[in-house]
Amino acid sequence: MIIISRQIEKEVYTGMRRTTHGQDRPPTRSPFTFARYSVPHEEHIERNEDTLLVDQQRGLAAVFDGVGYGPGHIASQMAARVIRRGWKRLLAKEQNTPALLEISRAVDLQAKLPHLLLEAHRQICTNGSRHIQIDDSLPEDKKRPETTAALITLCKNSEQDGYTMFYAHVGDSRIYLLPQTRPLKRLTRDDGYFSLLLKRELINEDDAYRIDQATSAEQLSAEEFDYFSKRNGITQALGDHSQPTVHIGSMPIAPGDRILLCTDGIHDNLTDQEIQQILQKGSRTRAARGLVQSAIDRSHQSDESIRAKADDMSAIVITYNY
């Protein structure tokens, strides 16, 4: 099943099947549990700029965060549709059944995933504006439909037991891995303000992480607090004027591991330590909702926390069961 969320969306995928009369059959054994939750910004509850894509059968999950004040939701929805169809076509070409791809097959996923994202970029650039009514009051850089993207695919290791995760991203939506016996690991680096500071050697990696994870102004110098306040800006997105650079990676995963994909409404409000604690304590089916609810709670604490920020908030949590 493929789910694209627009408003308040919540669903859990554990292998349960439906009969033609809507009754649950006994669950099939699935190595993965997919759970997702998304809520729109409280100032526009009728429109969610975030879009979630989940295709458990084909081992695909992605989050998209529409950029700007106008047509961002168009871009995020369009990217999800293009990537869903592209991944479906790829698997249909490589194998006869809609199942997780085997790594042994002659498919270069390190090339295919960027191709999927860049095809979404081209479609947004070509067709995105056709689906919106342009608000002339918006500045030019806010009229284009643009979106971030963070995507993972789960593939079987055919020569040995287990699975490998391939991932790709553009923008500041993040992918995390929580191994069963090790600390949370952030797999993506934001295309954002800190990346510019690092490139200009104004800060180092340790400084960037420390500033990003701050919970009070007292932890930062005046200059660092200025950096912190600008951390929400991004340097590239799908649908932007120039073609984005797609960041890719892969790693084996083990039973008990959890994968998190989230938009910045989650990681702007919560620190990595808080994210880890919620993932560790939350059940397979409730962790995504727990992250979103905790981020919402933090966003209401603007008088108490420098991290508080109202936003669309979305999370997908995938648990490797066995």
Image (cartoon, rainbow, N blue to C red):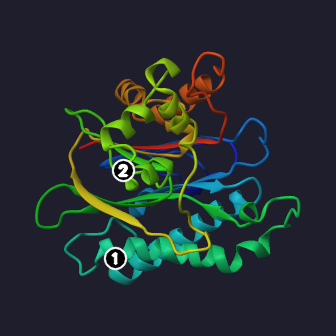
Q: Write down the residue under mark 2.
A: 201
Q: Residue at x 31, y 69 (%)?
A: 101
The front one of 197 and 209 is: 197
**1 or 2: mark nearer the eye:** 2
Q: Position of residue 287 (x, y in %)?
A: 45, 32
Decide: few, some or many residues near mark 1? Use Cα within 10 Å; few <14, some 14-19, many ≥20: few
Give the position of the C terminus as an image quadrant: top left
Q: Residue at x 69, y 42 (%)?
A: 40
For marks 1 and 2, the one nearer the N-term is 1
Decide: few, some or many residues near mark 2? Use Cα within 10 Å; few <14, some 14-19, many ≥20: few
Secondary structure beneath dot 2 equals loop
Q: Residue at x 71, y 72 (%)?
A: 128
Which amino acid, mark 2? Glu
- Distance, label 1 to label 2, CA atoms, is 30 Å
Q: Position of residue 108 (x, y in %)?
A: 28, 77
Q: Residue at x 71, y 67 (%)?
A: 144
To which quarter of the image does residue 76 belong? bottom right
Apparent side of residue 159 relative to residue 154 in the rendered image (left or right): left
Q: Using the rendered image of the protein, determine whether residue 185 is visible from the camera's viewpoint.
A: no
Q: Position of residue 283 (x, y in %)?
A: 40, 29
Q: Using the rendered image of the protein, determine whether residue 210 is visible from the camera's viewpoint.
A: yes
Which amino acid, mark 1? Ala
Q: Position of residue 191 (x, y in %)?
A: 47, 55
Q: Write down the residue under mark 1.
A: 111
Apparent side of residue 295 relative to residue 14 in the rendered image (left or right): right
Q: Which mark is residue 288?
A: none
